[in-house]
Amino acid sequence: MSKTKGLIGAGVGLAALAAAGAYFLRGEKGASAKRKVRGWALKMKGEVLEKLEDMRRIDRDTYLDMVDKVAARYAGRDNVTAEELRHMTVELRNAWVHIDKKIK
């Protein structure tokens, strides 16, 4: 891979990461949503961001598969209800729209 393609790929990755971070931490729901975020939900979002940063190829299917795998690790924990996990998974999956806009 040429140096230019590597730099372009890194730029696209950083743009996607910035978009995801902005959406997750300053999303549409604002300050009231931040007060409701539980510790595990913040950790889950952080894991998604870390994995997104490490992804070589960023596309919708790869992103959604990664979110599902992260969510599966939180299923069955004592402090996570099924409804909360489902809500968080949907929120993370819907973030793809915002990430995709920043990539393009």
Image (tube, rainbow, N blue to C red):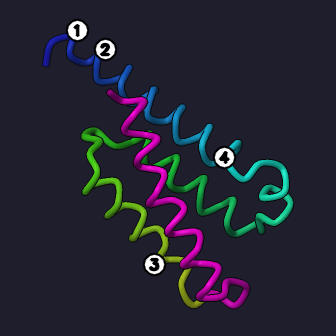
Discs 3/4, front: 4
Task: Give, as a single range, the part of the protein colored magenta.
Answer: 77-104
Q: Position of residue 85 (x, y in %)?
A: 58, 78
Discs 1/4, front: 4
Find out whether residue 96 is within the magenta segment: yes
Q: Position of residue 49 (x, y in %)?
A: 52, 47
N-term-proximal mark, 4 vs 2? 2
According to the picture, the residue beneath numbered tag 3 turns out to be 72
What amino acid is at disc 4? Answer: Gly
Q: Badges 3 and 4: C-beta atoms under 8 Å apart?
A: no
Quadrant in which the C terminus appears? top left
Find out whether residue 79 is within the magenta segment: yes
Judge whether 27 appears above or below 12 on screen: below
Rendered residue at 54%/62% (across/down): 91
Q: CA distance from mark 1 to mark 2?
A: 5 Å
Q: What is the crowding at mark 1: few (fewer than 14 residues within 10 Å), some, or many (at least 20)?
A: few
According to the picture, the residue beneath numbered tag 2 turns out to be 7
- What is the quadrant of residue 37 in the picture? bottom right
Q: CA distance from mark 3 to mark 4?
A: 23 Å
**Outermost residue toward the left?**
1
As helix, strand or loop, the secondary structure at mark 1 comes to: helix
N-term-proximal mark, 1 vs 4? 1
According to the picture, the residue beneath numbered tag 4 turns out to be 27
As helix, strand or loop, the secondary structure at mark 2 comes to: helix
Judge whether 44 appears above or below 13 on screen: below
Q: CA distance from mark 1 to mark 3?
A: 37 Å
Q: Any mark on residue 45, and which?
A: none
What amino acid is at disc 2? Answer: Leu
Q: Badges 1 and 2: C-beta atoms under 8 Å apart?
A: yes
Q: CA distance from mark 2 to mark 3?
A: 33 Å
